[in-house]
């Protein structure tokens, strides 16, 4: 019973996390599109136009990081599936090998004797172990993209606000 609840809570959390990632990526992309469409070219100097261009580039970096986080998370879920499948196959095949009686694979119609089951169980366990190592690396990568996305978005927004405030104090002729 508690296993079902914890699985359900994890599923709800995962869906909420994905929706949040999609929202941040979409909002960042919309902001970059708006800023790029309304960007007024100016000489590269210490002025509000240059600061706004820098803010647009930083927010664009945040957008790229957001999409890389989503991509890495998708790969993470695929590798997680491979690990779980390997563990489940290893467990089922080990039971067949220990039982000493061959079975019939219902999906393929292939008979599996205990020796073959033991060999396949070892292969499935090795596959699961390899996936476990990759999961650790992917988990850290997903976290890094999350960290980078949020920091770049925050920095970009601060730069954008600073550029907009600064432009109010600089005469229009001085900006160009």
Image (spheres, rainbow, N blue to C red):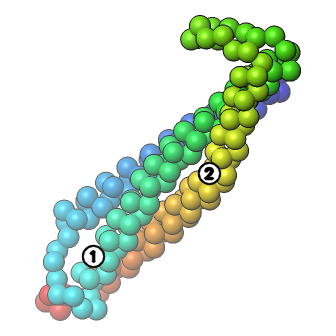
Disc 1 packing (10 Å; few <14; some 14–19; many ≥20): many
The correct choice, above or below, for 132 with respect to 160 in the image is: above
Residue 15 falls left or right of residue 87:
left
Of circles 1 and 2, which is in front? 2
Locate residue 160, reporting x and y percent: 36, 73
Which quadrant holds residue 13? top right
Residue 40 falls left or right of residue 160:
left
Identify the residue under disc 2: 134
The tag earlier along the polypeptide, 1 or 2, is 1
Tell me which residue sits at (60%, 35%) in the image: 81
Locate residue 62, reporting x and y percent: 42, 64
User: How many numbered marks appear?
Assistant: 2
**Nearest the camera: 121 or 22?**
121
The correct choice, above or below, for 159 with respect to 32 in the image is: below
**Residue 14 seen in the figure:** no
Identify the residue under disc 1: 53
SS category of the residue bearing label 2: helix
**Nearest the camera: 4 or 136?**
136
**Nearest the camera: 142 or 161?**
142
Q: Quadrant of the N terminus?
A: top right
Disc 2 packing (10 Å; few <14; some 14–19; many ≥20): some
Tell me which residue sits at (78%, 18%) in the image: 114
Which quadrant holds residue 157? bottom left
């Amino acid at each position: 019973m508690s296993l079902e609840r914890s699985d359900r809570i994890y599923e709800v959390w995962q869906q909420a996390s994905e929706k949040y990632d999609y929202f941040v990526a979409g909002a960042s992309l919309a902001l970059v599109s708006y800023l790029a469409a309304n960007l007024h070219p100016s000489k590269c100097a210490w002025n509000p136009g240059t600061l706004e261009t820098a803010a647009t580039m930083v927010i664009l970096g945040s957008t790229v990081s957001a999409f890389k986080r989503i991509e890495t998370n998708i790969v993470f879920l695929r590798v997680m599936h491979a690990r779980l499948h390997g563990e489940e196959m290893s467990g089922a095949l080990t039971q067949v090998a220990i039982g000493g009686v061959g079975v019939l694979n219902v999906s393929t119609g292939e008979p599996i004797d205990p020796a073959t089951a033991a060999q396949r169980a070892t292969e499935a366990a090795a596959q699961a172990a390899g996936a476990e190592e990759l999961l650790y690396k992917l988990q850290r990568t997903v976290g890094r993209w999350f960290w980078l996305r949020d920091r770049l978005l925050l920095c970009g927004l601060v730069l954008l606000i600073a550029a907009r405030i600064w432009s109010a104090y600089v005469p229009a002729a001085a900006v160009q």
